[in-house]
Amino acid sequence: MNQTSLSKDKIKILLLEDLHQNAENYFRKYGYSNIISLKNALDGDELKNAIKDAHIIGIRSRTKLTKEVLECAEHLLAVGCFCIGTNQVDLTAAASLGIPVFNAPYSNTRSVAELVIGEMVMLLRGIPQRSWAAHHGKWLKNAKGSSEVRGKVLGIVGYGHIGTQVSVLAEAMGMKVRYYDIVDKLALGNAESCATLDELLTVSDVVSLHVPQTPLTNKMINAEKIAKMKKGAMLINAARGSVVDIDALKEALDSEQLGGAAIDVFPKEPADKSEEFVSPLRGIPNTILTPHIGGSTQEAQANIGLEVAERLVKYSDNGSTLGAVNVVEVSLPVQETGKVTRFMHIHKNVPGVLSGINNVFSKYGLNISGQYLRTDGTYSYVVVDVDGHLDNGLEICKELKEINGTLKVRYLI
């Protein structure tokens, strides 16, 4: 097993927000023992103090790693987001500090897809308002406003990993699937693509959103778009809270332009269970409101714990950035333990850095047995294997750090 320039028992790992035990178990399996695991999120000075001497931090969605917080992390090597989204991390700031950020883009797709299917059935059957009535002593035993999903048109906005799983499940239930994506995607089964979002909205009985948070998707479902939907159609959002104009949605539900909605993500969400959830949608009978639990199943969290921990360990042990979302991805061969010393250098993509790196190795008379370089135009990542087990790695790293444009340097022996 490779030994980092800092022994593994000294590499401090901070895990927040009650991550699945699989994560900690995986770190320990590969020799990491200096682990602090907390059930809650941290913020403010508490977070800054906790991250100050951490080498690896694992979070979910509530911990916010801003530029200010990241700049307090004096030894941070990598960030693991144990979820799909990474908007809780300032990715640009992390990249500028040479800190790769990893996430789990696939592990909870099934959980989200199943929630969407379940909510769709509930909405089409009119279950939310019937349940609401029963809680208030009323007995709405009739078929009014209650429909089967079979034969209905499901419109999927965003035909990625989750959207395609929803597509397959819905079609198996007898639905007609239409989808819209800004990128051409191959249809699964009998699903058909729509040329525009407006086309999808006008033909769908149920619209389900599965898009990322970007300036393009900010309030993409607004009053104008809702007006194009079928009267009485249903809207499901398990994507990002910024995608739907909540006030416009409330008006559409009040006016019965829409027949119901299921919302799992909101523009503003409580930081923890002690904070009150506030939304204009509270109190509307034909809505399902859930607290951002699309990926919150035991199976999904177990898978995420393994997936992200594996990527963090590979980066720490081997230098591989495969799966990073903010730096170039480099998949590296297994280092020949004892035969080579591996140096990793993240830097700004400016002239002279690579020659400066080679000059350092040349100065020490080292033979380079392997070199790997990737750049995204802004930042570059170069990995250099040199022959032999070096005792002066720290001295060499010090000189590498002095090269203009250097962001982060470390080595493995």
Image (spheres, rainbow, N blue to C red):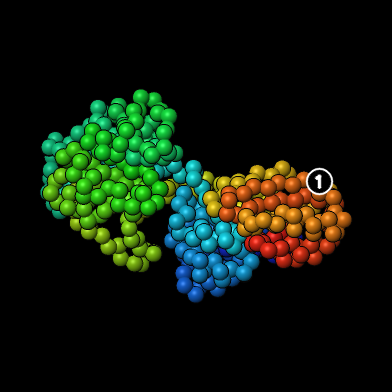
Which of the pair 230/356 is nearer the observer? Answer: 356
Q: Which residue is mark 1?
A: 369
The residue located at (43%, 61%) in the rendering is 62
Which of the pair 410/346 is nearer the observer? Answer: 346
In which quadrant of the rendered image does the C terminus lie? Answer: bottom right
Q: Position of residue 339 (x, y in %)?
A: 84, 48
The quarter of the picture where residue 117 lies is top left
Q: Position of residue 189 (x, y in %)?
A: 39, 25
The residue located at (26%, 28%) in the rendering is 150
Residue 303 visible: yes
Q: Amino acid at mark 1?
A: Ser
Left or right, residue 122 beside residue 372: left
In the displayed structure, would residue 70 be above or below residue 130?
below
The quarter of the picture where residue 378 lies is bottom right
The quarter of the picture where residue 360 lies is bottom right
Q: Position of residue 319 (x, y in %)?
A: 68, 51
Which of the pair 131/376 is nearer the observer? Answer: 376
Left or right, residue 60 beside residue 2: left
Q: Position of residue 220 (x, y in %)?
A: 30, 48
Circle 1 packing at 10 Å, graded few (<14), some (14-19), many (20+), is few
